[in-house]
Amino acid sequence: MSLIPSFLSGRRTNVFDPFSLDIWDPLEGMQFPGSLTKVPSSGAGETTAIANTRIDWRETPEAHIFKADLPGLKKEEVKVEVEEGRVLQISGERSKEEEERNEKWHRVERSMGKFMRRFRLPENAKMDEINAKMENGVLTVTVPKQEERKPEVKAIDIAG
């Protein structure tokens, strides 16, 4: 028995399975600025995005630091780019595992597919000194900041 008619979702769901992830998403395929971009899937059972791509952005006196949890991804599967207009783009893809004919899958809960996040960087970002590193499934992007220029104060002698 299904909560959602099969003609709406194109797949069967099981209301008695508390771990079933086959839930109809009315916003599937829509794009929202600054959020996870969903990419149309190529296969019927393929997850359309890495759903839990969370990115922290913190600012220190010296830099803007972005940290993304990307477990299971290699650095070759992730791209960090800077676009015109001071936009930092972090994207990547987790490929679907090849199925062997003699294997029986009981559950597939790890998501696969493409993701993309964009951040508009502030004016004080040094765009030519951005660096990124990947360690233990955590991507860290460091964007150094320009030093704040303090206004120069010049003393004026008062005549008289």
Image (cartoon, rainbow, N blue to C red):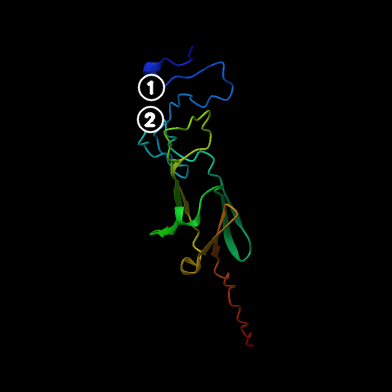
Residue occupying image coordinates x 39% and y 40%: 39
The label on residue 10 is: 1
Q: Is residue 94 above or below residue 8?
A: below
Residue that sits furthest to the top in the current view = 1
**Residue identified by numbered label 2:** 44
Residue occupying image coordinates x 63% and y 86%: 157
Q: Residues within 10 Å of mark 1 (few under 14, many from 20)?
A: few
CA distance separating discs 1 and 2: 9 Å
Q: Nearer the viewer, residue 69 or 99?
A: 99
Residue occupying image coordinates x 39% and y 34%: 29
Q: Position of residue 115 (x, y in %)?
A: 45, 45
Q: Nearer the viewer, residue 63 or 66?
A: 66
The label on residue 117 is: none
Mark 1 or mark 2, which has the lower sequence index? Answer: 1
Camera sees residue 16: yes
Give SS at disc 1: loop
How many numbered marks have been drawn onto this rendered protein structure? 2
Left-right relation of 53 to 83: right
Can you tell which of label 1 and label 2 is closer to the viewer? 2
Give SS at disc 2: loop
Q: Quadrant of residue 84?
A: bottom left
| Callout 1 amino acid | Gly
Q: Position of residue 19 (x, y in %)?
A: 57, 25
Q: Are marks 1 and 2 in contact (CB under 8 Å)?
A: yes
| Callout 2 amino acid | Ala
Q: Residues within 10 Å of mark 2 (few under 14, many from 20)?
A: few
Residue that sits furthest to the front in the current view = 102
Q: Position of residue 158 (x, y in %)?
A: 63, 85
